[in-house]
Image: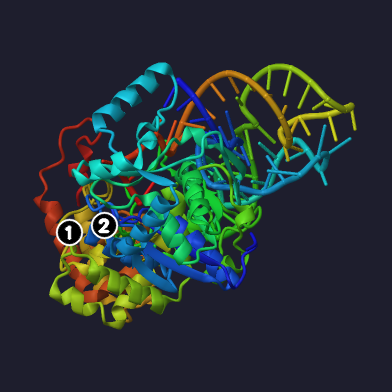
Amino acid sequence: MTTKLTKASRLRFAPSPTGTLHVGGARTALFNWLLARGCGGKFILRIEDTDRERSTEESVQVILDAMAWLGLDHDEGPFYQSRRGEHYALALATLRESGRAYPCFCTAERLDALRKQARADGTAFVYDGLCRALGEDERASRIEKGEPHVIRFAVEPGSITEFDDMIGGPRPFENDRLGDFVIRRSDGSPIYHLTVVVDDHEMEITHVVRGDDHVSNTPRQLLLFDALGWDRPHYAHLPLIQGADKARLSKRHGATSVLEFKREGFLPEAMINFLALLGWSLDAETERLTRAELIENFSLDRINRSAAVFDKTKLEWMNGVYLRSKPLDEVTKLARDFFRLDPDDALDLISDKRLDEPWFESIVALEVERSRTLGEMRRNLDCFLVASLESYEEKGARKHLLKPGVCEQLARTAEALRAVENFEAEGLEAALRSLAEREGLSFGKVVHPLRMSLTGRSASPGIFDVLIAFGRETSLERIEQAREWIEAQPPASESPASESPRQEQAR
RNA sequence: GCCGCUAUCGUCUAGGGGUCUAGGACGCUGGCCUCUCACGCCGGAAACAGGGGUUCGAAUCCCCUUAGCGGUACCA
């Protein structure tokens, strides 16, 4: 077995189903997947659900869904540790027979006391091996009596475990710091360290690539591999991902679950690209890499040794880049599916039907370059999808609608629009420009109130595009509604800034 | 507390003794484009944690300090 990855290499992702798949786990999965795909080896999915208290089926489903969304397909599995009890029991028996494991009857109270004492002494807690000294006869009789006990692994005192981390380099470890650790609970279930070792061996895992939080587990697992007489896999420990405050990523950092990003309208390919660049880089400038390029170029030796902060803003930028680079019909389909998927979204029947019309593609075209995610696009497109506007953006209304003369001017704008022969960009521009000229107004003074009337906002696609998207009839309707709204507003308050001339200037 | 890992712009990073007056990207910012917003384009501010060594020469090697993170379970 070599460090180099070959077609014979077998890697795995082994999450515990105790919550959602967060970006850290997703990155670990991605790195394993890239490595496997890059060398033509196998990628195995294993669900580590030996903790019956915390593992849930929903969580398993979430992991599966998230992996599928990201396109991280596995060649074998998913295997469930909860269904592999006999394999662990067998390994346990072997260890018992060879004398490398023994029953321990120490109570939680005694252990707690030892822990406190160690703390007081300024040293790390290590089990003192009390029960290791027990004779087989006593062990048998106490077990016979039904005394609760765990099984501990007997660590060779004074020994050293060393391994060469493919990312971190040589890591010698004093086994005395471990003490005889537990490998089976008093309820008879196996502990993680044992299950990983048994599974990694039986599934013939050659390279274990996992989070940095597992480094301290590695010596224990190595000890078990050795005691069982099995070959050790190679290890690579990935630096962790941190939140903006440099703390370990958690719920308080906002969206951290992969499926949350999906819900917000991120694209899996952008997610993959971004995650790959968290702790790994190809060179000094390459930012965008396709899946194929990642597979081809990804390698362990260009992985950073320091933790990276998850920067959502940059992810948003990258997602925008991907969105903009897609062909329009593809974005349209994505948008349509995304809009319909959102359970919180109350698209009425009429607009839902319109999602299938060519018209929908035309409005998507207007917002792609203004949207970084599909969610943002949904919000930007809202004014086109509702039957009528419910409100006007406050600041914009104050600036562009509630000014003297605007209401009347909108009436004349409406007239001009009614008179346009061909309701397309050229004709509309000519009409509005000549209107502005006749009125002695800047073009913007004509456009802004119109934009507010049509979209309810001060920012939108180009006004001609907006007019065309609505069509003459709806455009005129909205102008009329805006005029009614303006008239319904209480007269300008007596704030010094707005003063009297405003009313008088009204023509 | 103890053990371990890490330390380049706010963030992701390039850099592996001279080519570094430290490069790219996000973000921020000035400008151009312009009916607004975006997009795009052009410019700007912004970093080698601190202190000792080693060396003719240190962002690069070593040590210490500091800071952050991880681990310290009958969780995984």
Say if residue A444 shows up in the picture: yes
Residue A347 lies in quadrant: bottom left
Please tell me the numbered disc located at residue A65: none
Quarter holding residue B43 = top right
**Residue that badge 1 annotates:** A482
User: Would residue A316 be seen by someone viewing this image from the given angle?
Assistant: no
Q: Position of residue A432 (x, y in %)?
A: 35, 66
Q: Earlier in the sequence, mark 2 or mark 1?
A: 2
Q: Are marks 2 and 1 in contact (CB under 8 Å)?
A: yes
| Secondary element at tag 2 | helix
Question: Which residue is denoted by mark 2 in the rendering?
Answer: A452
Query: Who's the residue at 41% across and 30% down the image?
Result: A126
| Left or right of B58, for residue A136 | left
| Rendering coords of residue A56 (x, y %) | 23, 57
Q: Nearer the viewer, residue B7 or A305?
A: A305
Residue A253 to residue B39: above or below:
above
Badge 1: how crowded within 10 Å, few (<14), some, or many (20+)?
A: many
* Subunit of label 1: A
